[in-house]
Amino acid sequence: MNFYPFHIGDYISHTSHLSDEEDLAYRRMIDLYYLTEKPFDDISLLCRRVKAELAIVENLLHEFFIFEDDDCWHSKRADIEIAKYQYLKESGKKGAEIRWGNREEKPTQSIPSSPPNATPLATKTITKTITKTKVNTIPTPAGVSGDLWDDFLIYRKRLKAPVTDRVLARLVKEADLAKMPLTDVLETIIFKGWRSFEASWIQQAQQKAKELPLGTDQQIEEAYRVECGGDPRLARFGSYFEMKKFIMDTRDKRKVA
């Protein structure tokens, strides 16, 4: 896709907290997503293509994208727009074939979940149909209330992501790694709008909560003092940019450790 709808107000309201580097990287990630019409599956390659550091790209992925069962990072909004574009593109090809005399029957093009000409009433009907569909019959896990489990199954159904034994086993494993009850994991997935769950997301969120902002020179000095245990007045950096890079490298090393 060489064009996609861009709502300035929505973008500003969702990204006003980002630094200049994060904002630039996020815009490049969005453009790349639409240009390739594919989710992200290689973070190191993604870093090179958007010209951003690994820590920045990982933070943006966890905040604005969803890691799905295909082991790729997805954007819900972009996936819908891409599906609309591909639908119109295929419909246009079919119309051209008919117009120019190629009337050979071909399999019917499947319509995306949100067709380009869908009305609010049609969308509401689709949602209602999904909700009424029979929920997965996997038994309620131990320690989880029946109501919460039903809510979780309905939520996954709306995402068109059925809960299998493999999916449940992975959630239990990640809950153990995060040292969280499965109940809390399921509630977190629903309320945050996630498709799955990884213990590293919680650990990174906790680590990020301890990280100080790096927007101004004063903030960089304070972060260096608190997070690195150094005195900015005695530090031998050529610029605040070098000090900031040192702080971010220190954070990356803590994440690896």
Image (cartoon, rainbow, N blue to C red):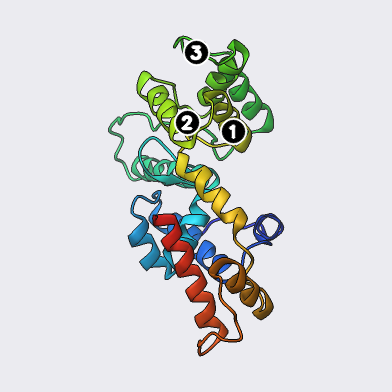
Q: Residues within 10 Å of mark 1 (few under 14, many from 20)?
A: some
Q: Position of residue 114 (x, y in %)?
A: 55, 35
> Of helix, strand and loop, which one carries label 3?
loop
Q: Is residue 137 above or below residue 110?
A: above
> Of helix, strand and loop, which one carries label 1?
helix
Q: Position of residue 92 (x, y in %)?
A: 42, 45
Q: Residues within 10 Å of mark 3 (few under 14, many from 20)?
A: few
Q: Is residue 29 above or below residue 235?
A: above
Amino acid type, label 3? Ala
Q: Residue furthest bottom?
A: 238
Residue 230, picture quadrant: bottom right
Say left or right for 147 vs 142: right
Quick one: 146 or 183, which is closer to the camera? 183
Of the numbered discs 1 and 3, the one sitting upstream in the chain is 3
The residues tagged by marks 1 and 3 sit, at their Cα atoms, a distance apart of: 18 Å
The residues tagged by marks 3 and 2 sit, at their Cα atoms, a distance apart of: 13 Å
Q: Residues at badges 1 and 2 in contact (C-beta under 8 Å)?
A: no
Q: Position of residue 50 (x, y in %)?
A: 43, 67
Q: Residues within 10 Å of mark 2 (few under 14, many from 20)?
A: many
Task: Tally the marks.
Answer: 3
Q: Which mark is residue 188?
A: 1
Q: Which mark is residue 175?
A: 2
Of the numbered discs 1 and 2, the one sitting upstream in the chain is 2
Q: Residues at badges 1 and 3 in contact (C-beta under 8 Å)?
A: no
The residue lying at 44 percent from left, 62 percent from top is: 252
**In which quadrant is the N terminus drawn?**
bottom left
| Residue 2 seen by the camera | no
Amino acid type, label 2? Ala
The residue lying at 39 percent from left, 33 percent from top is: 109
Residue beneath label 3, please? Answer: 142
